[in-house]
Amino acid sequence: MTGRIKLLDNGVSTQPDSDLPAIPYDYDMPTAYDESCGSFGITQFQLPHPQCPLKFVCDLPLIENTPVGQFADCVESQNCNMFVGMTTGVSARSEAALFMHQMIPHHENAINMAKTLSKNGDLDCDEFDEDSADCAMFDITLSIVNGQNFQVQTMRGLLESYGFPETDDCVVAVPPHGVEGDDKTDGTGEPGADDDSRGGGRDLGEKDDGRGGGRDLGEKDGAGGGGTDNICISSTGVYTVRVNLFAGELGTLCLSVLARASSAT
């Protein structure tokens, strides 16, 4: 927040032709999308986004062009903003720093969601009534905005006091989602008649039997030890892969498996 104090002499400004002191920065202005949501800084996080899943609200297509659909759209962007903000490094080598770098975007998301609900939600609390559910909900939004804003500012001050970096963001791309619309379902969200119990119709963890070229992903890779069950998940189903890898290596393997599965379907 910025402000100037104007000095008056008998009601007449002593600096009639100048605005002093100078403000060395421009004000952040909300976009039309931010204004429609009643929050700030979420425009660039509208889905799809390379660092976020395809959706946060699963039934959004069923409520498009409705007030709750517009609210859900804002929530998806806010969640993506938090999702990106909560991928952080540990350059400070401090539990407190990691906590604050994670918690600040978490709090900011709660604040944004509360602002959107109080602005665009169907809460009827023009006159406060402690027995009204809407008023209880409205009171919660105000408490979140006030309390968590205070905590965000406190944590930012603590980061500075400790000498920790203000942010410690790292980029974590979400694996490819596969081809949209290729799920075989019966319209209820459950696997349809064409699916088997694994959802994808094909177990890429089995030995190659002519259905999906390649080697048995369950065999030992020379690193020693038997494979453990892990899964790769795509929009076409869940493919079981028996591997003996660390989690990071599993992620790389999943990408190659899912790419192969996508090209084979």
Image (spheres, rainbow, N blue to C red):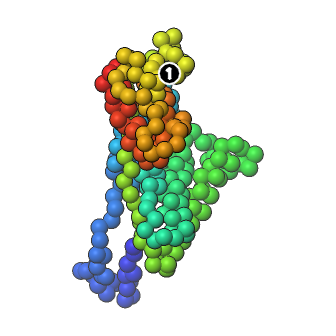
Residue found at the very far right of the displayed protein: 131
> Which image quarter: residue 154?
bottom right
Vertical placement of 37 versus 211: above or below?
below
Residue with the mark numbered 1: 199
Q: Let me know if residue 162 appears in the view.
A: yes
Considering every residue shown, the one lying at the far top of the view is 193
Q: Is residue 155 left or right of residue 177?
A: right
Kind of residue sitting beneath label 1 = Gly
Q: State the residue at coordinates (47%, 55%).
A: 86
Q: Number of labelled discs?
A: 1
**Picture coordinates of residue 221 (x, y %)?**
42, 39
Q: Is residue 148 above or below residue 73?
A: below
Q: Is residue 78 visible?
A: no
Tell me the residue at 31%/87% (across/down). Answer: 14
- The residue at the point 52 percent across, 22 percent down is 198
Residue 104: x, y in percent? 50, 61
Mark 1, Cα crowd under 10 Å, few <14 / some 14-19 / many 20+, is: many
Q: x%, y% of residue 22?
A: 28, 79
The percent position of residue 247, horizontal first and vertical second, equals 47, 46
Report the side of 46 relative to 107 (left or right).
left
The answer to which of 197 and 96 lies nearer the viewer is 197
* Quadrant in the picture for residue 207: top left
Drawn side of residue 202 relative to residue 121, left or right = left
Closer-to-camera residue (1/174): 174
Q: Nearer the viewer, residue 109 or 12?
A: 109
When the figure is inspected, residue 117 is found, relative to residue 176, above or below; the finding is: below
Q: At numbered mark 1, what does the secondary structure look like: helix, strand or loop? A: loop
> Which residue is at 34% across, 19% downward?
265
